[in-house]
Amino acid sequence: MGARSPEKSRPSVFWPLAAMVVPVISLLAKIRVTGSEKLPREGAFVLAPNHYSEFDPLIVAVAVWRIGRAPRFMAKESLFKVPVLGWFLRHTGMIPVARTSSASSAKQTMKQSAELVEHGRGVIVYPEGTLTRDPDLWPMRGKSGAVRLALADGIPLIPMAQWGTQAIMGRYQKGLSLWPLRKTVRVLIGDPVDVSDLRGRAGEQAAMNEATTRLMNAITELLEQLRDEKAPAERWNPATHGQKETGRLDS
């Protein structure tokens, strides 16, 4: 049997959610997107944004929706077992992330990547894995999840940066800063990161590290444009500062 036809860019299951979420986000933020033409209008993609606010997934989701694609994210596998929420995650094509051994994880990545290609879907993956630990909100050291997905089937790896969300909800802030309404959030999408030379080495850690570095460099360069300033020469590494790699950052 041949591959299934690619899905419609924005399947019907997303429309009721968008009807509720988009107007609310539009009250809180004026989202200005530059480079929207660089996100493929059809077919698979891996979109990799920076991450410094618990609110920014909503900004990214609305930006992607307005461009014309369904905003699918990677989500913890355990969430798929929660009643109602699990049904929604499965029916919107979100991708589960399991805490498994490296061999099982590699097998899962291959399967997920093939499904993205088969169904013509895109996925949003935060390469930092959690909110940045950098005190000035620059991207920190990345993890390899996004590049592994992209390399497995040669899927376009698209960097994205957004800035301004912190005025709505700062990192680990409780509640939203509602006044003034409609704060400007700028989103910048970059050219695909070229990792084609590393595809044959997808099982090597050195290749994964190199691909991740290229991706994080691209995201950081986009954020430098939005902030009109230079990032630190050395990217923040939680391990060297005695910080946890995941979860909330202790004050």
Image: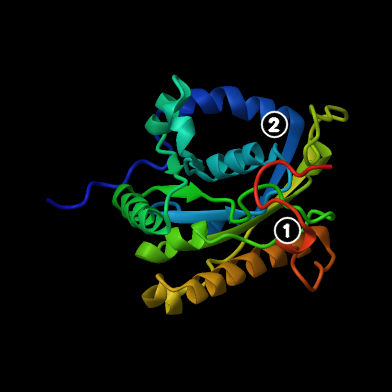
Q: CA distance from mark 2 to mark 1?
A: 34 Å
Tell us which disc is closer to us: 2 or 1.
1
Measured along the vertical axis of the image, is residue 46 above or below residue 204?
above
In this orientation, which residue lies closer to the viewer: 129 or 115? Answer: 129
Relative to 52, is 157 on the left or the right?
left
Task: Tell me the tag on residue 238.
Answer: 1
Q: The C terminus lies in which quarter of the figure?
A: top right
Residue at coordinates 82% horizontally, 68% vertically from top-left?
A: 230
Quarter where residue 156 is shown: bottom left
Q: Amino acid at mark 1?
A: Pro
Q: Horizontal and vertical percent for residue 83?
A: 44, 20
Q: Is residue 213 left or right of residue 220?
A: left
Asked whether the beta carbons under mark 2 and mark 1 sit within 8 Å of each other, the answer is no
Q: Which residue of the protein is positioned furthest toward the left in this rendering?
A: 1
Q: Is residue 10 above or below residue 20?
A: below
Indicate which disc, 2 or 1, sits on the residue closer to the N terminus: 2
Q: Position of residue 102 (x, y in %)?
A: 42, 58
- Residue displayed at 85% across by 65% down: 229
10 Å crowding of disc 2: few (<14), some (14-19), many (20+): some
* Mark 1, secondary structure of its residue: helix
Residue behind mark 2: 26
Pick the residue in front: 243 or 192: 243
- Disc 2 secondary structure class: helix
Quarter-wise, where is residue 214 in the image?
bottom right
Q: Nearer the viewer, residue 148 or 251?
A: 251
Q: Is residue 202 visible?
A: yes
Q: Residue at x 45, y 52 (%)?
A: 41
